[in-house]
Amino acid sequence: MQPIAYTRVSDVTSAITEAASDPGSEFLAGGTTEVDMLRIGVARPRRVVDINDLPISRIEELPGGGIRLGALARMSDVAQAPSVRQRFPMVAQALELGASAQLRNMASMGGNLMQRVRCSYFREGTAPCNKRVPGSGCAAIDGVNRGHAVLGTSEHCIATHPSDVAVPLVALDAVVHIQGPQGTRTVGFDDFFLLPGDTPDREHPIGHGELITAIDIPPMPMARRSHYLKVRDRESYEFALTAAAVAMRMENGVIGEVRIGLGGVATKPWRARRAEEVLTGQRPDRETFERAAREEMAPAVRRSMNGFKAELGRRTMVRALETVAAMGGTA
């Protein structure tokens, strides 16, 4: 590992000033991904700015029943928060199915959103990778791509976004608060993650020196009856092959509103808007769920080893919808 300067700060303004003053600097929060990137040489900052002392770790109430998650709130603390477990159970479930207990005790919510992809070609360091070295090519397209995406891909990148908790958050229309040298701003969750297109090295809209300070989950009473389903090769410490987060509101025997996020199948946390449109106003039965899931997965682009994800994603979505429908209730 190359020598790296280290700075520890205790307030947000100092953190932004320190990072913005040096284009070779990066923030360090829980470090569960960043330290990996440093060890394998994929990340090569001249300096890290340690932000673990910043006062942005609280879990706060918002008017109307929403919740604000400080960017440095640990995954395990958010998963155990009564307000999260009661109002947004699929968020707590996604957190508890992510990583190991040790990692969840260290990893921050903001860091979870900023974690890098698990594509072996990205991390291997010498294989062509447009995300690591723009214009070098994508070895995954014709390589070992069993874990890669089938939705939202381009000819330049097919890496799957790895976050579990981002899947229910995209379904809930969460909002990301960002502070930087030019002030503060907010970005809707679905706009925060960028499709690879022709610029797969740009994964989010955050500029150098900008810092995530909080994530807002807006009020959504129907999310009290919600579910996160994760399908993976083994039961512990494994990334999703497919995942689905579903919240549903019934109204006079039909689906009044439904929110669906998908994981493991796309290059970003995937909002299943095509399926939501099919389902709204329909009876909650197996035939309708199957039709909606087929519609969502229809644009899937299959590669040599990941074609099964289109079918597995469809089945995962149907099973999650059936689980929430069986909970009953109207809100």
Image (cartoon, rainbow, N blue to C red):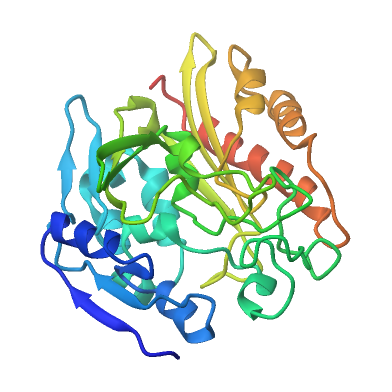
Tell me which residue sits at (63%, 53%) in the image. Answer: 200
State the image quarter where residue 71 is shown.
bottom left
Q: In this rendering, would 303 be left or right of 50?
A: right
How far from the left and from the top, in percent, is residue 190?
Answer: 49, 36
Q: In this rendering, would 268 be left or right of 103?
A: right
How far from the left and from the top, in percent, is residue 233?
Answer: 66, 68
How far from the left and from the top, in percent, is residue 298?
Answer: 80, 34
Quadrant where the C terminus is found in the figure: top left
How far from the left and from the top, in percent, is residue 143?
Answer: 83, 69
Q: Nearer the viewer, residue 187 or 262?
A: 187
Q: How many marks?
A: 0
Tell me which residue sits at (84%, 53%) in the image. Answer: 307
* Up/down of 79 relative to 170, above or below: below
Tell me which residue sits at (54%, 30%) in the image. Answer: 325
Q: In this rendering, would 147 be left or right of 118?
A: right
Q: Nearer the viewer, residue 282 or 100?
A: 100
Identify the residue at the far top of this view. Answer: 252
Q: In this rendering, would 207 be left or right of 255?
A: left
Tell me which residue sits at (48%, 27%) in the image. Answer: 248
* Up/down of 67 relative to 199, above or below: above
* Up/down of 201 relative to 166, above or below: below
Quadrant where the N terminus is found in the figure: bottom left
